[in-house]
Structure formats: structure tokens, C-alpha cells
Image: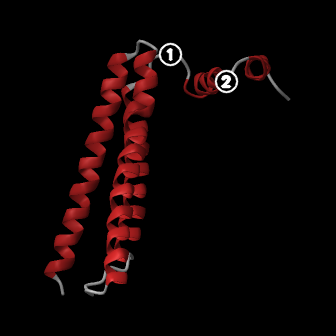
């Protein structure tokens, strides 16, 4: 069973370029109508949770890198490579989290829905700050109870 909208979307996807097909899919999923504040807040929460999950993964990886304090030349090369990996990971992380936080707001802005885009960025950043405050609180509680 397919309705006319599904058929139209599939037909457009077959005849458009890949970028246009993605736009059609996003339009079908999110719609072109203005979003309610509740929907923007929920989408901001989803984006913030995705960002927090990614940062948690990066923290796990960094925590498990084997850093050494040996003066051996082999160890020095290993240390340089580890620093290189950390810096490249930082650049990749900034790119990924930038897409997570600003990706959909850019799409909204390009569709002349700037007010919603700004509100979505503000909601996402607010959720990230709240998640950070929760994490700091948990750390402080754990440190106060050895």
C-alpha cells in the first residue's frame, strides 16, 4: 500500500540528482510547514544527545590511548603519532559536532526559515549546557563520596 505522496517522492527521487533526492526525503520527513516550539525543543534535545553520545565515545577512545613517559626514540615516535592522532581526532570531532549542531538549522535557514533555525541552535546549545551541568554534578557527587 502506498499513497500518492509516497509515489510522488519515489518518482522525484528517481529523476533528481542525489542532493535533490535528499532534499525531497527531508521535506517528506520534516515537512515545509513551520515547526512548533515543542518540536524544535525535542529536535534540539535529540541533536544534543547525539552530540553528547559522540563526545562520550571520543572521551572513551582518548582515555584508552596508551601514553608513555619513556625517553626511548621508538617511544618518542609513538608519542608524536599519538599527539597527531589526538589533534586529527579534535579536527574530526569539531567537524562532526558542527554538523550535529548546525546541520539542520542550515537547511532551515536556506529555506528562509531563519527564526526556526536560530531557535533550534539555541535549543540544542541549551540542552548541551544542561547535559554538561548534569555531568559536572555527577562528577562532584562521585568525588565527594570516595
Image position, residue 47 (x, y; %): 41, 43
Question: How busy is the neighbourhood of tag 1: few (under 14 within 10 Å), some, or many (20 plus)?
Answer: few
Seen in the image, is 78 located left or right of residue 143? right
Q: Residue at x 46, y 23 (%)?
A: 107
Q: Which residue is mark 2?
A: 21
As drawn, which residue projects farthest toward the left?
144
Q: Residue at x 67, y 24 (%)?
A: 21
Under circle 1, the secondary element is: loop
Q: Residue at x 79, y 18 (%)?
A: 11
As drawn, which residue projects farthest toward the front?
73
Image height of 123 relative to 139, above or below = above
- Could one spot residue 42 in this view of the protein? no
Q: Residue 80 falls in which quadrant of the image?
A: bottom left
Q: Residue 140 falls in which quadrant of the image?
A: bottom left
Between 62 and 110, the one nearer to me in the picture: 62
- Could one spot residue 65 in this view of the protein? yes
Image position, residue 66 (x, y; %): 37, 80
Badge 1 vs badge 2, beta-carbon distance below 8 Å: no
Seen in the image, is 12 located left or right of residue 33? right
Image position, residue 102 (x, y; %): 38, 34
Question: How busy is the neighbourhood of tag 2: few (under 14 within 10 Å), some, or many (20 plus)?
Answer: some
Q: Residue at x 58, y 27 (%)?
A: 26
As drawn, which residue projects farthest toward the top?
112
Q: Which residue is mark 1?
A: 33
Q: Residue 89 falls in which quadrant of the image?
A: bottom left
Amino acid at each position: 500500500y502506498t499513497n500518492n505522496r509516497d509515489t510522488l517522492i519515489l518518482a522525484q527521487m528517481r529523476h533528481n540528482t542525489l542532493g535533490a533526492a535528499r532534499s525531497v526525503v527531508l521535506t517528506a520527513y520534516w515537512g515545509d510547514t513551520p515547526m512548533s516550539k515543542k518540536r524544535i525543543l525535542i529536535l534540539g534535545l535529540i541533536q544534543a544527545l547525539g552530540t553528547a553520545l559522540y563526545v562520550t565515545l571520543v572521551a572513551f577512545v582518548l582515555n584508552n590511548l596508551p601514553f608513555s613517559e619513556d625517553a626511548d626514540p621508538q617511544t618518542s615516535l609513538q608519542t608524536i603519532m599519538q599527539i597527531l592522532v589526538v589533534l586529527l581526532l579534535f579536527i574530526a570531532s569539531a567537524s562532526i559536532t558542527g554538523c550535529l549542531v548546525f546541520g539542520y538549522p542550515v537547511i532551515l535557514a536556506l529555506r528562509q526559515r531563519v527564526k526556526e533555525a536560530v531557535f533550534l541552535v539555541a535549543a540544542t546549545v541549551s540542552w548541551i549546557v544542561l547535559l554538561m551541568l548534569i555531568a559536572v554534578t555527577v562528577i562532584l557527587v562521585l568525588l565527594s563520596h570516595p
